[in-house]
Amino acid sequence: MTCSRKGREQGDRIGILLPPLAIADSRGGSVAGMSGALAAGYPGPAELTPLRVLTEWTLDPLALAFVVILGTCYLAGVRRVRRQGQRWPRARVVLFAGPGLGTLAAATMSWIGVYQDVLFYARAAQTILLLLVVPLFLALGRPVSLAIAALPRGGRRVERALGSRTARVLTFPAITTVALVAVPFSLYFTPWYAAALHSGAVRELTCLALVAPGLVFFWTLLRVDPVPKAYPYLVSLWIAGAEVVFDAFLGLAVIADQHLIAGAYYHALARPWGPSPRTDQILGGGTLWIFGDLVGLPFLAAQLIQMIREDESEAADIDAELDAKDAAGRESTEDEQEALPGDVPWWEADPRFTGRFRPAGRKPG
């Protein structure tokens, strides 16, 4: 497996070659720009093959630094919590570092990162990974709970912030869902997409813009961490269903779009291998649709698991309360029975009967 700067350098060469063309028309084509690019030659990576899917890697310094910093902070927090004598599940560490940070690294530095500026469907796969997969598993790692446990002073500030009215408004399910849907729609149906193809700074900011709303969305709905307000899981399930519908709508909108998204860029790129720009966009729309729906399944599974656990916890609390009341009632009955004379029948001392019945031969008072 090789790791090099080749994909990033080639993407930068593409950006240097085509800036005026892509900014001038992010959805159409230009004969003059295309002929100029053809004269300069195709500057992108070699044809994508199954072998290159496994071996092609590129170095993204900012993405790598982000992964390393997040991983280091999380592991330091786990170590500190365990030193304090508290337990932190290994499964949470695995979810955060493996499918969470691992997927983030793969989305930015594997073949997806190498071909993100060349193939529309590669960038579509990256969009789904950054928007849905990475935030889901980062949220399952319970970073908020870890911060509160590892940093007592900072944890109190976090708890106060979570209890604020601003936090409750910003994390209202309708707002988080709209943000999750609006970001990819804005990316694909505004000049933002062409700008991200064209500028390294915009590309990195786009990655953050995709991860952030997804992280807030999953954090507030999964409720494995403290949240400003806990909404019923039925609301979460409805929102998850709506999110699946919007993923499908986004993919279908991309497929049905008669204009090529960033068409000037892709025409001028003149990639000599692989699908045509139109077919590439159809494949990208299908990726957004099908892949987006598939990765929604782990979210639904996590919601169901968390709901079952909460139900079991509530049932255990109710059982414990009933057992305590039953034990207190038995002790009270035993004390009353011990206080009764041995030759007196139980019904003569029971207040339910003494007022109604009197033993034969006994006078009141």
Image (cartoon, rainbow, N blue to C red):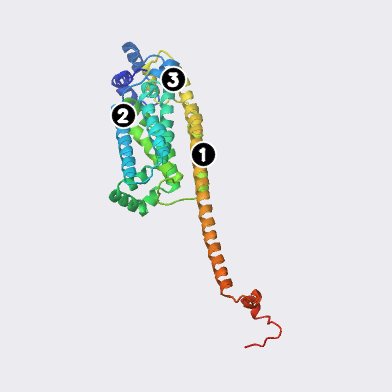
Q: Mark 1 points at which residue?
A: 301
- 2 or 1: tag closer to the N-terminus: 2
| Marks 1, 3: nearer the viewer | 1
What whole-number distance in Å separates the C-alpha atoms at marks 3 and 2?
30 Å
Closer to us: 232 or 360: 360
What is the three-letter code of the residue carrying label 1? Ala
| Along the viewing direction, whichever of 18 and 335 lies nearer the viewer | 335
- Mark 2, residue position: 64
Residue 59, placed above or below residue 192? above
| Of marks 3 and 2, the one in the foreground | 2
Task: Examine the image and state in which quarter residue 73 appears.
Answer: top left
Where is 276 relative to 337, above or below?
A: above
Pointer 3: what residue? 277
Q: Residues within 10 Å of mark 3 (few under 14, many from 20)?
A: many
Query: In this view of the protein, which residue sits in the foreground, 28 or 207?
Result: 207
Image coordinates of residue 358 in percent, x first then y, are: 68, 82
- The quadrant the N terminus occupies is top left
| Helix, strand or loop status at disc 1 | helix
Question: Marks 2 and 1, how far apart in space?
Answer: 30 Å
